[in-house]
Image (cartoon, rainbow, N blue to C red):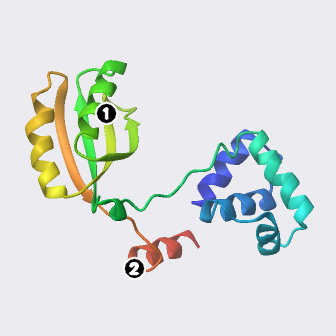
Amino acid sequence: MLKLIKDSVHAQDDNVDSFDLAIIKELSNNARSMNTEISERICLSPSATLRRHRKLEESNVIEGYHAKINYSLLGYHDVIMLEVKTSILAPQVAFEVRRIAETYGKITNFYRCVDEPGFVVFLAVASASDTAVQLHQHLPNLQFVNGLKLRLISPINSNDPCWESQRESET
């Protein structure tokens, strides 16, 4: 992931260097890290780290900070990826897809497809199987929906064998 960040950052600003990328990596891992902690980890003085951090914020390389929510503690035990293919791409279609999805769970991410009309919704739900049945009954009845695909997904953490194979392929 850092390689992708580096490529996209360099496309925007040639003044971004390895220390800036290290700051981005540290903040990606923990946005609440103290400046002194980051400076120790990247071997740069606290004042230089803070100056670079502020520059990254002012130049919108860092756009903001977000809370990471543990939805299972709120009763949402599954996450589904919902792909909705539509006949048109219009604000009212996006609003309707979002409105329906919100009735079945908590939307964690909502994307517009760029290669064809449609949306991808990540939805935290209490039960994937119950929600799948309900969504399959509700969404296809809308006139603008051409197709619907649901997938039960789970995050890959550092203990997952897939994580290790990904790390090995990056080196």
The residue at the point 31 percent across, 33 percent down is 98
Query: Around disc 2, counting alpha carbons within 10 Å, would you say few (fewer than 14), some (14 to 19), or many (20 or more)?
Result: few
Query: Around disc 1, counting alpha carbons within 10 Å, would you say few (fewer than 14), some (14 to 19), or many (20 or more)?
Result: some
In this view of the protein, which residue sits in the foreground, 136 or 83? 136
Quadrant of the rendered structure where residue 24 is?
A: bottom right
Determine which residue is flagged by label 2.
161
Quadrant of the rendered structure where residue 156 is?
A: bottom left
Disc 2 residue type? Answer: Pro
Determine which residue is flagged by label 1.
98
Disc 1 residue type? Answer: Arg
Whole-percent x and y of residue 43? Answer: 84, 73
The residue at the point 14 percent across, 25 percent down is 142
Q: Is residue 149 left or right of residue 163?
A: left
The reply to whether residue 90 is in sight is no
Whole-percent x and y of residue 59? Answer: 77, 39
Considering only vertical position in the picture, is 8 above or below 115? Answer: below
Local SS, label 2: helix
Q: Is residue 119 left or right of residue 53?
A: left
**N-terminal label among 1 and 2:** 1
